[in-house]
Amino acid sequence: MSREDTLADQLRVDYTQADLAERERAMLDYVDKLTRTPWAMRESDVESLRAVGFDDLAILHIVALTGYFNYVNRVADALGIKIEEGTWEKMRRHGPIPWQEESGSYHGEPASPGGASEAALTP
């Protein structure tokens, strides 16, 4: 099993027990709090992301993606919609997101002119 597979399994079970860098842990702590108790968010939560190197653009994207997935899941749950098998695997294979490099959230190789690089295909 690769490190990525092991990490994915750890994240599915309990991200707090996963082998993560400080920056990754801070992001997931923020996302967890935003998901579970959005009314409890404070400026200090944003500052905790800045303290580990996230800039305002990266923080905006963390919030937007968290909100989007929470919204989609809430709607799907409310309507009894089942996610098609393989959907999450398809989403893993996205190309680079345009803002990844300037926000500091991208650590792979840039995409080749003909399509996404292999590094860009893994989260």
Image (tube, rainbow, N blue to C red):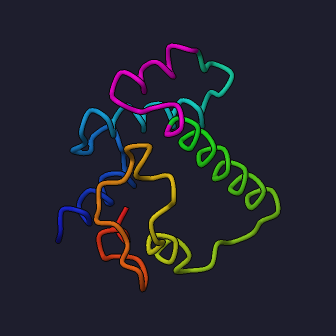
Instruction: Confirm whether the magenta stretch covers residue 107.
Output: no
The C terminus - image quarter: bottom left
Q: Is residue 112 above or below residue 101?
A: below
Residue that appears at 59% across and 45% down: 66
Magenta stretch secondary structure, dominant:
helix
Outermost residue, bottom side = 114
Q: Nearer the viewer, residue 54 or 92?
A: 54
Question: Where are the magenta residues, as a range?
Answer: 43-58
Q: Which quadrant holds residue 87?
A: bottom right
The answer to whether 71 appears left or right of 58 in the picture is: right
Instruction: Confirm whether the magenta stretch covers residue 57.
Output: yes
Residue 13 percent coordinates (x, y): 37, 51
Residue 74 percent coordinates (x, y): 73, 51
Residue 48 percent coordinates (x, y): 42, 21
Q: Is residue 96 above or below residue 26?
A: below
Q: Is residue 45 above or below residue 63?
A: above
Q: Nearer the viewer, residue 101 or 37?
A: 101
The answer to whether 90 appears left or right of 27 in the picture is: right
Residue that appears at 29% across and 69% down: 119
Residue 29 percent coordinates (x, y): 43, 32
Q: Which quadrant holds residue 92?
A: bottom left
Q: Nearer the viewer, residue 44 or 89?
A: 44
The N terminus - image quarter: bottom left
Residue that appears at 33% across and 40% down: 24
Residue that appears at 39% across and 47% down: 105
